[in-house]
Amino acid sequence: MASEHGMVTKNIVVLGGSYGGISIAHYFLKHILPALPQKQEYKVVIVSAASEAMCRQACPRALISDDLFPQNKLFVSIPKQFEQYHPGQFEFIHGSATSVDHEGRVVIIGSAANSQTQVLAYHALVIPTGASTPSPLFGLNVGDEKNLREAWEEFRNGLETAKSIVIAGGGPAGVETAGELGEHLNGRAGFFSSRIENPKVSITIVTSAKHILPHLRPSIAKTAEDHLTKVGVTVIKNNRVVSVNPNNAGVSTDKIASGALLNLSDGTNLQADLFIPATGFSPNTKFLAKDILDSSTSQVDTNPSTLRVDKAGPRIYAIGDASNYARAAVHSIMAAVPVLGTNMKRDLLLEAGVPESQMPAEKVFKEDRRETQLVPIGKAKGVGAAMGWRLPSWLVWLLKGRDYWLWTVAPVWSGKQWAKES
C-alpha cells in the first residue's frame, strides 16, 4: 500500500479490538514506532468486527439490566481511543479477516457494513482475535454492541416470566451468571440459613466435572456451591447436557428465550424456560490456515516463550484466547503484551537494518501457573485465589465483585496502562 507521499506503507496489522489487540496497538505506537528509522513508513491497522471494546467479564451481571453499570464505561469506541496519535499512524477497519495468506503476507478483510472485501498487505501481523462463547449473551461474538444488546433484550423479556433456568457449564461464566440471576430473582438466604427453601425461580447448573470451578481447589469450589445454594441455585455434577430441543435454544438470538427440553448424560431430562450454554469457548481462528493451528485446540500454535508464530513466517505473533501460549485469562494477556512488544521491536529494528548491538534484549514469556481465579457470586459474595493464595470473600468483592473489573479497563483502552515501556 502506497501513502499519499508515494512511499510504501508498512502496515502493522492487528486482527482484533479487545484486550490484546488494543494493548499491542498502543504499545507499538508509544514504544516501538518512535525507535524505528523512517517511522513515517509505518502504520498500525486494527481490524475488528466490533467498533467498540467492552469489559466482557461484566456480562453475567450486565445481561440482567442496563442499570447495573454505567454504559459509557461498559462499551467504548475503539477509534476514539486512538485519536491521541497522528492520523497517519493509525487506521481502524470495521470488519473481519476472512483469510490470511501468510506466504504472500496479505489479509483478506470483509466489511462489517456491506459485502465488499479488501486486500491488506502486512509488514507485521498480530493475531489477538479472541474466542466466541456458545451463548450470544457473553460478549461481542457477532458484530457490534447493537447485536449484544439485542441478545440481552431477548433474554430480559424471557426473564420476566421464567420459572426455570438451566445453565450448562460450571466454569466462572456459568457460576457467576447463576449467582447474579439467583440473587436478582430469589434474593439471598439469611445469615443463619444455608438455603432458600422456596426460591421463586428454579436455577440449575449442570457440569460434567466433579466440582464447579475446576481451576480452583475443591475446598474453594465447595464454598462457591454453598454461596450458590443461598441464592436458590442447585448444582448437578458429573453430568452434562447431551442434546437440546430445539437444538439452537440459547445459541441463536431468536431462541434465547424459547424454552428447551434438555437431555442429560445420565438419561434424565430437564425442562428450562431459559437455557444458557456456558461451556467453554471456540477460538476465532477459522479464517487461518490449518498448518499454523494447534490441531487439538484450533488455537494459533504460538511459541510460548517469544509469542511468535514460527510456522507462519517472520514478524507474525499471537496473543490472548486465540493463541495456545497460555491458559485463557486477562492477566496472562497483560503479562504477555510487553514480551510480544519487545520481541516485535527487535524484529522490526533488525528488518530495518539496525545493528544487533543496538537491539533491546529479547524477552521470554513464562506463564504464571499458580492458582489464580476470582469468581463473584452475586453482589456481596465471591470465592477465589491469587498466585496460589486463597482470598476471602470480601477481597474477591473488592477486587472484582463490585463491578466485574470495570474499574481496571479504562487505562487499558486508553493506553495509559502502557505509558511506560516494560
Image (cartoon, rainbow, N blue to C red):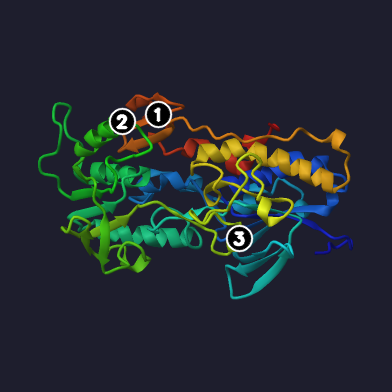
User: Which comes sooner in the sequence, label 3 or label 1?
Assistant: 3
User: What is the three-letter code of the residue carrying label 3?
Assistant: Asp
Residues under numbered marks 1 and 2 in contact, where contact means CB atoms less than 8 Å apart: yes
Q: Nearer the viewer, mark 3 or mark 1?
A: 3
| Residue 419, disc | none
User: What is the three-letter code of the residue carrying label 1?
Assistant: Ala
User: What is the three-letter code of the residue carrying label 2?
Assistant: Ile
Image quadrant in which you'd find residue 242: bottom left
Residue 399 location, x and y as percent? 43, 30
Residue 79 location, x and y as percent? 64, 53
From the image, tell me which residue sits under label 3: 291
| Residue 385, disc | 1
The residue lying at 69 percent from left, 41 percent from top is 341
Residue 134 location, x and y as percent? 39, 58
Please give left or right for residue 216 compared with residue 291 in the image: left
Name the element at disc 2: helix
The residue lying at 35 percent from left, 52 percent from top is 278
Categorize mark 2 by other alpha carbons within 10 Å: few (<14), some (14-19), many (20+).
Answer: many
Categorize mark 1 by other alpha carbons within 10 Å: few (<14), some (14-19), many (20+).
Answer: many
Categorize mark 3 by other alpha carbons within 10 Å: few (<14), some (14-19), many (20+).
Answer: few
From the image, tell me which residue sits under label 2: 220
User: Which comes sooner in the sequence, label 2 or label 3?
Assistant: 2
Q: From the viewer's perspective, is residue 395 above or below residue 207?
A: above
Q: Residue furthest left?
A: 197
The residue lying at 64 percent from left, 67 percent from top is 109
